[in-house]
Image: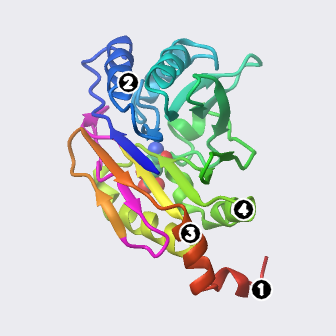
Amino acid sequence: MRASLLQIDVDLKETVADRRDRVAALVRAQGGTDLVVLPELWPVGAFASDTFAAEAEPLDGPTADVMSAAARDAGVWLHAGSIVERDPDGPLYNTSLVFGPDGELRHTYRKIHRFGFDQGEAALMAPGEEIVTVELPDTVLGLATCYDLRFPEQFRLLVDAGAQMLVIPAGWPAKRREHWRLFAQARAVESQTYVLACGTAGTHAGVELAGHSMVVDPWGDIVAEAGTGEEILTVDLDPALVTKTRHDFPVLRDRRLG
Ligand SMILES: NC(=O)CCC(=O)C(=O)O
């Protein structure tokens, strides 16, 4: 199974519409890949919270339209990162979109843990409530977003729901890059899953982003890691390695506390 992580440079000098078109072209160029992953809130910028309300869109809005067409044209499963979703009832959510190779929106995931300590996203968005997994032909994805990485209990629930590959779009700051790298490996080791952690490049709203998208295998080894600029990481994954790791070193079987 081949996956491509598109570490997008989010520069607010580029308009949201231009970035959508540019990213769609990058997705279209990934034909032959099984799964393409984009970062958190790449249309607007994860830290550009003063634009969240104005740029919020519904699940059938412009980003979903453009990403659906790109997934269909490339014939790939597309985790299109997240958008600022405006729910018809009013609240905003940080919502990930997963499209099938036919371009159909198959799953959404509303970020459960909001970052900002009562400011930014934490003040402006409502929290998601549901654990989400996505069945692919060869594996089961478990969805989480950025700050969720700090909450291992979410990943236990994902493992219990059958996740074998954790997909984590992010807009993680450079200041805490080593936390990002550590958590990506830790979640892979404790869950005995692949981790596909797709970050953002560049600087926006005064925050330098970490980049360093990573693919970690179920043993915790880093299979591939990006630098700090815009970059595409393409990796071949072996879904059977999850079962083998869990069989050969069966720590999950020894859980006693839930
Ligand atoms: N966008 C985010 O969730 C940022 C998370 C972060 O900066 C951190 O956990 O540190």
| Residue hosting label 1 | 256
Residue at point 20%, 42% (across, down): 229
Image color mode: rainbow
Residue at point 53%, 37% (across, down): 121
Secondary-structure class at tag 4: helix
Where residue 235 appears, as percent x and y from the top left, is 35, 53
Foreground: disc 3 or disc 4: 3
Foreground: disc 1 or disc 3: 3
Q: Is residue 37 above or below residue 173?
A: above
Label 4 vs 1, first from the N-terminus: 4
Q: CA distance from mark 1 to mark 2?
A: 46 Å
Q: Is residue 213 magenta?
A: yes
Give amino acid for label 4.
Answer: Leu
Where residue 160 appears, as percent x and y from the top left, is 74, 65
Give amino acid for label 2.
Answer: Arg
Quick one: quadrant of the C terminus?
bottom right
Residue 157, numbered label? 4
Secondary-structure class at tag 1: loop
| Residue hosting label 3 | 242
Q: CA distance from mark 1 to mark 3?
A: 21 Å
| Residue hosting label 2 | 28
Q: CA distance from mark 4 to mark 2?
A: 33 Å
Label 3 vs 2, first from the N-terminus: 2
Magenta span: 200-221
